[in-house]
Amino acid sequence: MRRTHYLLPTLKEVPADADTVSAKLMLRAGLIRKVASGIYEWLPFGLRVLRKVERIVREEMDAAGALEVWLPVVQPKELWEETGRWTYYGKELLRLKDRKDTEFCLAPTAEEVITDLVRREVRSYRELPVMLYQFGTKFRDEIRPRFGVMRAREFYMKDAYSFHADEQDAEKYYKRVYEAYTKIFTRCGLQFRGVEADTGTIGGSFSHEFMVLAETGEELMVSCDCGYAANVERAECRALNPGSPEPPLPPEDVSTPGSWSVEDVAKLLKLSPEKFIKTQFYVADQEPVVALVRGDREINEPKLQRVLGCKVLERANDETYRKVAGCEVGYAGPVGLKERARNPKFRLVADLSVKDIVNGVSGSNRKDYHTVHINVGRDYQPDGFYDIRVIREGDSCPRCGETVRFSRGIEVGHTFKLGLKYSQSMNARYLDEKGERVPFVMGCYGIGVSRVVAAAIEQRHDDNGISWPLALAPFQVIVLPLNVTEPNVMGTAEKIYQELKDKGVDVLLDDRDERAGVKFKDADLTGIPVRVTVGEKKLPAGLVEIKGRDEAKPTDVPVSEAVGDVLRRLK
Ligand SMILES: [Zn+2]
């Protein structure tokens, strides 16, 4: 490809509303342009990268036995009502009406449509398992689109769905897809990690996220040398070190006028926040719940929701708080709470971090007083101790007990074992060996193809621009003649360019009549892995310069060996 005939509008200035490295570089290097909030055009240069990701994903999905289909992006309301997600999905689901006032949505995902397809077309256990996948545009009406294409409203995704006769087969397939994903991100040339994750709005029994490691990543994950890795929201916590043993003392109310936060009361009483039992009020499916956690820790609400098994979990308002605690907001504590409560029907759940607190401190359920020397069993008894807190740096690994590491990443893939969630609600069944109609066991597996492009940039860039991994680079090589009006320079550049093209290399010839500085800057910004520079200075000695994008200095190579040198670098 010749640069003079290629639409590659690079920008010197950083666009004002670009909020991440990848968003800035994708705009500056001419990969994308913004059309509206969270909606982008992909220019030829960007689309080349997207297609390379797509090809790798397609090859590995095909190798895993998946069959490609093409599903509609405009989907009827009726199907979404069958699973309850027409309501449950909320405002992220963009709804529209056709000319006959029939309601549709723009697909943010395709479980409903695919389950409908399979319940119509797959009848018998003999046809199972079947895995279908597609590449397509998805739309999620994000409240605050940001991070360029990473949290765009319209994005490009690979979504796959598998249907099985039983759990064992679904699990076998899940592992197969997990391995396919590992191959995909390895082939993309990215550093990544598969971590245990939460199931979110897709639902189902368990799931993994594939994270591209990047310091700028939005997601926090924990990992351990033993192999344990999880999203921070999901990561399991153990009980905490109880500290040095001390004899239990009799409980005592102390005056704490105007102080109610752990921080303030800890300061006032000259006690560590680790001695505090924080008491938080929730409403779970309209029933009040009181949750306890150590003073220096936070409740992990998705975990609490799982423990309670409720559909909706919300923080209680002040009125509910007063009703349950029987006191002013900020002064509640577990001691005597059940006896004091005006509505005694509530659950009292405690985090494991509370279990070993000896002579703890909490609110006394009356204004301006706290109680010290509280001990579990003697002074209060929760309905149960659970893992309901957010993991923190310094915590120990739930598997081996060593200290976990925290790192950042960008989620680019997600696998879910769905079980019967969709097949039951949509009555999607097949005939088993005994002739009974039983629901399919399902799995679903996504890769944010457009997101992979942004994640690759977040992981691989420097002050000068992008540094593509070879497998994703829009062009593998740039041939850069420094003076295009000099026939010998241009002739040599053309020759190298043509030879590389003949060898099947993706090569760009920067044949613009521009200053050397401009061309070098653009070459670095656009991140092409190998640069061949043909200049007036070295050409008389029969030399060109070859430089890898991440190398500090170019190497002089004889013109006759230039193509061979490049090909070796691409291996
Ligand atoms: Zn471990």
Image: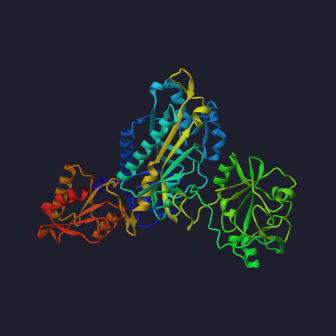
Q: Name the foreground residue: 521 vs 319.
A: 319
Q: Name the foreground residue: 29 vs 395.
A: 395
Q: With 308 as the anchor, is 545 left or right in this view?
A: left
For the point 49% across and 37% down, the residue is 168
Q: Does residue 180 lie above or below 211 as drawn?
A: above
Q: With 2 as the anchor, is 340 left or right in this view?
A: right
Image x and y of residue 543, in percent: 15, 67
Q: Name the foreground residue: 163 vs 518.
A: 163
Q: Name the foreground residue: 430 vs 425.
A: 430
For the point 22% across and 66% down, the residue is 483
Quadrant where the C terminus is found in the figure: bottom left
Image x and y of residue 351, in percent: 68, 59
- Residue 98 shows in the view: no
Q: How many marks?
A: 0
Q: Does residue 181 lie above or below 18 as drawn?
A: above
Q: With 213 as the anchor, is 139 left or right in this view?
A: right
- Residue 555 shows in the view: yes
User: Please, which residue is most extreme toward the front here?
Assistant: 247
Image x and y of residue 289, in percent: 76, 53
Asked which colour scheme the image uses, the reply is: rainbow
Image x and y of residue 564, in percent: 17, 58
Residue 512 picture quarter: bottom left
For the point 53% across and 42% down, the residue is 417
